[in-house]
Image (cartoon, rainbow, N blue to C red):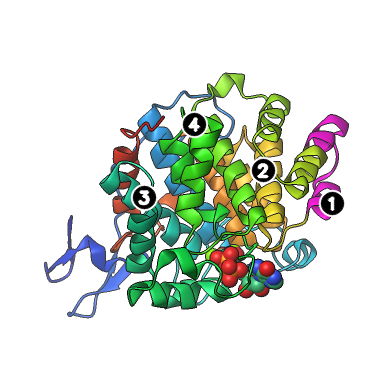
Amino acid sequence: MAITCPHCGSQFDATLFQFGHRVRCHCGTEVEYPGTDLRAGHIVAQGEAKEASYEDCCIGCLLGTACGDILGAAVEGSSARDIRELYGEIRDFAEPGRGFGCYTDDTQMTIALATSLVEHGRVDAAHVSAKYAEFYEIWRGYGGAAHRVMRLLQDGGDYWGTGRLQFPEGSFGNGGAMRIAPVGLAYRHATDDVLLEAVEDALVCTHVHTEAIDGALVQAKAVALAATTELNTFDPKTFVSALSSVCRTDVMAMKLRTLAEGLHHKDEDVYVIGRVGNGIRASQAVAAALWAFLRYGKTPEECIIRAVGFGGDTDTIGAMAGALVGALHGSSWIPARWYDNIENGVHGRDEILAVGKELAAIDVR
Ligand code: R7I
Ligand code: MG
Ligand code: MG
């Protein structure tokens, strides 16, 4: 798309609007990003039930990931209390240093995985590992071990070995779960065993620890269920009990039990998050994102805002909660103040939309 400078008439490629909604023309004029007409008239009020097409669920899932990631990135590592005292609620994107509207590793790896699925038709460990390395940008805020792994993969390292470089049993970090949503979409009709194998292959170059795999498996299954659930039949209690049957570790099973009890007793967020955690461990961040979804999934924008408000690994919890509400609701709920400000350069918003569309055609069983 070309954008015209209102002062001198020069034309810009829209990809120049990578980090914000303004660009400076050579004549000195600040040219505003005009937004997009793709979504004109599609903003739906919070809580308004609207069935989305499956294609829109895929787009919503990827864009929801980006929105949660960008919203949470400004306060990653802050406690819920600090967020509350300093900001009240985080409802708008902020400038975290990387650039306004700029996503982090969570979204970057999610788009890489989605792209690999679209190109290969299913998860292929070699293909997807190479794709992560191709998309990798050092300044996106990757976890400690990821940098070394990505550099080794870029230099032709063996993806079967890189997952144990830092820790002998592999990383229990949430870097697998944070990016797994596209697998849930593409394998929505697969058996749990087929889904598990896909999750393991999508994670093998970075996360081989059983907790990291189990967290990602639960998140993938949750996305698959959300994307195939009719909005008006979404029932949090049924949803969490369906997840209990796929998890394979005691730690994840216990967290899911805590969520089910929390729903049953109508527990406060602070109590539930205090029990399941909000940290970098896969089981913690997955449980926290799921709690946001179970508790606030009917109101998607609110769900992401609450997820970020839980504190801790806020970009990741926000990204995973965003993937879940997007899979359930599609994309029409995304407020313009978020949508218009998602970075839109290389691998940016327009590309996310296009990949989401293509992902919808994949149905591995
Ligand atoms: O899991 P990973 O990709 O990190 C994802 C996080 C998200 O919050 C992103 O938003 C980004 O900020 O990073 O990265 P890893 O390096 O695999 O794991 C992250 C961290 O978890 C490590 O740097 C360790 O501090 C910790 N960790 C472990 N510590 C001790 N023993 C992971 N596994 C272990 C372990 O086995
Ligand atoms: Mg991140
Ligand atoms: Mg994070």
**What amino acid is labelled 1 in the image?**
Arg
Q: Mark 4 or mark 3, which is nearer the start of the sequence?
A: 3
Q: Nearer the viewer, residue 325 or 277?
A: 277
**What amino acid is labelled 2 in the image?**
Leu
Q: Residue furthest top?
A: 233
Q: Nearer the viewer, mark 2 or mark 3?
A: 3
- Tell whether 50 sits left or right of 4: right
Q: Are marks 1 and 4 in contact (CB under 8 Å)?
A: no
Residue 128: image location, x then y, percent: 37, 56
Q: Is residue 66 visible?
A: no
Q: Residue at x 83, y 38 (%)?
A: 262
Q: Mark 4 or mark 2, which is nearer the start of the sequence?
A: 4
Query: Which residue, given by chain and number where applicable, does mark 4 sit on?
Result: 227
Q: Mark 3 or mark 2, which is nearer the start of the sequence?
A: 3
| Start-end of magenta stretch | 260-276
Q: Nearer the viewer, mark 1 or mark 3?
A: 3
Q: CA distance from mark 1 to mark 4?
A: 28 Å
